[in-house]
Image (spheres, rainbow, N blue to C red):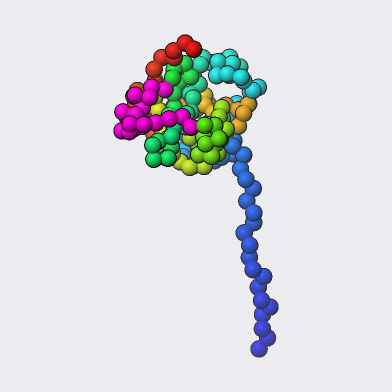
Amino acid sequence: MPTEPAAEPQTAAPTEPQTGRERVESDAAARGIPLDMVERTNARSLEEAAQILGITPADIVKSLVVKRHDGSFLFAEIPGDRQISWAKLRSVVGVNKLQLPDASVALEATGYERGTITPLGSTTPWPVYVDERIVGRRVSMGAGEHGLSAFVDADQLIAGLQATVADISDELTPR
C-alpha cells in the first residue's frame, strides 16, 4: 500500500498590525457604533481642532486615561469645554485615589498617543465613564491617529461601550 507524503506543517499567516484608525473602526463596527472619520490638518490644541472642524470645543469629547490605585485604568469622556472633576469621578467610581498617568503609561495602557486616545480599539477595554453633558449629542473624538477625528452619536457610543453616565466634570478654570 503506498504511503502518503507527510503533510507540510501549517503555519498561520502573519497578521498585519492594525493602524490606530483601523482598530477604532473595527471595534466600533463590532459594537454597532456608526462612525464618520474626518481627516483634518494637525491641531496644536482642542480649540484649534474645533475651529478646523467647524464645531465648538463642547462638541469635542476629550478621552482621558485615568489610573486607579490598583494599577488598572478607566476612560473618562469629558466635553472639550470642561475639565475632569476628580471629586465627582472618585465618587462615581467608588475610590479614594485616581490620577492622570504620564503619556508613556497612557500609551502602554491603550495603544494610543495623547491627542488620539479613544476607548474604541484600546489594547485593553477599560471601563468607560461619560460626562452626562454629551448625552443626546453628536460629538467628535480621538480616532487613534493624529490628524483624524471620529464623529459619533454619543448615545450610540454610550450604549456600545456600556459606559457609565454621570456628572464627572466641572467648568474650565482659567490657567
Q: Quadrant of residue 167?
A: top left
Taking the image as shown, residue 7 lies to the left or right of residue 68, namely right
Q: Is residue 75 magenta?
A: no
Point out residue 70 in the picture as x, y percentages from the top left corner: 39, 40
On the question of residue 161 being in view, the answer is: no
Q: Residue at x 47, y 16 (%)?
A: 81
Residue 48 sits above or below residue 121 on the image: above
Taking the image as shown, residue 40 lies to the left or right of residue 137, namely right
Q: Is residue 96 magenta?
A: yes
Q: Residue at x 64, y 48 (%)?
A: 16
Q: Quadrant of residue 74?
A: top left
Taking the image as shown, residue 19 lies to the left or right of residue 141, namely right
Q: Residue at x 49, y 12 (%)?
A: 175
Which of the two residues, 2 or 165, is positioned nearer the viewer here?
165
Q: Residue at x 54, y 31 (%)?
A: 103
Give the total number of marks visible in the rendering.
0
Give the residue at the far top of this rendering.
174
Start and end of the magenta stretch? 84-101
Point out residue 101 in the picture as x, y percentages from the top left corner: 48, 32
Q: Quadrant of residue 73?
A: top left
Which of the two residues, 20 or 170, is positioned nearer the viewer here?
170
On the question of residue 41 being in view, the answer is: yes
Point out residue 21 in the picture as x, y percentages from the top left corner: 59, 35
* Quarter of the figure with the N terminus: bottom right
Point out residue 116 in the picture as x, y percentages from the top left corner: 56, 30
